[in-house]
Image (cartoon, rainbow, N blue to C red):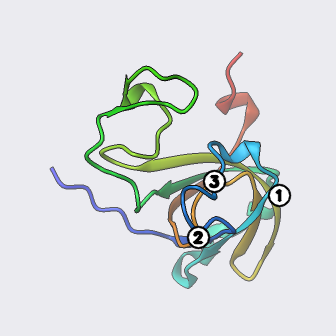
Amino acid sequence: MKIEICPIGRVRSPFRNRSDAPRQGRLSNAVSEIVIDPPFRPGLYRVERKRHLIVLCWFDRADRNALLVTPPHNPVEHGVFATRSPDRPNPVALSVVDLLGIDDGVLRVRGLDALDGTPVIDIKPFSPEIDAVD
């Protein structure tokens, strides 16, 4: 089976390489922009009513052959599916971000750990009632 994913936009970020980026986006106050491609901008209708968004990115610079990794906080090797490593067979990244504003198809967000130019594959509203666990 082959799966095809079409990016809906790209990230504009202060993070140019992996060493610049925080381990988790929520650990940084850096502001990034998500530039939505014109054909997908109608999908942003009423997104400004949301305070938080789930952003799915494709970490295009990840090592897609990684199956075993050593997390930075634990010197013991783990299977990639037991970690939040960006290096994985399908490098889909999930971030919950604060929506700071939107202007002409560009979302200003805080809490995104994606590198500059990273493809964005989807955006969903974050709902604490549905997305948070006790």
Give me the residue at 43% from left, 25% from top.
Answer: 82
Instruction: Please name the residue shown 38% across and 23% down the image.
Output: 77
Which kind of residue does numbered mark 1 sit on?
Arg
Q: Earlier in the sequence, mark 1 or mark 2?
A: 1
Question: Label 2 is placed on what type of residue?
Answer: Asp
89 or 17: nearer the viewer = 17
Using the image as rendered, state which of residue 83 and residue 20 is in the foreground. Answer: 20
Between disc 1 and disc 2, the foreground one is 2
- The quarter in which the C terminus is drawn is top right
Q: Provide the secondary structure element on which disc 2 rests.
A: loop
Q: Which mark is residue 49?
A: 1
Q: CA distance from mark 3 to mark 1?
A: 23 Å
Residue farthest to the front, as pictured? 75
Q: Is residue 105 above or below residue 134?
A: below
Q: CA distance from mark 1 to mark 2?
A: 26 Å
Q: Secondary structure at mark 3?
A: loop
Q: Between disc 3 and disc 1, whose residue precedes?
A: 1
How many numbered circles are shown?
Answer: 3
Residue 71 x/y as whole percent: 49, 31
Q: Which residue sits furthest left?
A: 1
Compared with 41, 82 (above or below) is: above
Can residue 8 be spotted in the picture?
yes
Q: Return the x and y of residue 9 as percentages of the image width and height.
A: 54, 73
Report the mark closest to the observer, 3 or 1. 3
Measured as percent of width and height from the top left, residue 106 is found at 71, 76
Residue labelled with disc 2: 116
3 and 1 marks in contact (CB < 8 Å): no
Kind of element beneath mark 1: helix
Give the Cα separation between the discs numbered 3 and 2.
Answer: 10 Å
Residue at the image position 34 percent from the left and 51 percent from the top = 63
Q: Residues within 10 Å of mark 2 (few under 14, many from 20)?
A: some
Q: Which residue is mark 3?
A: 113
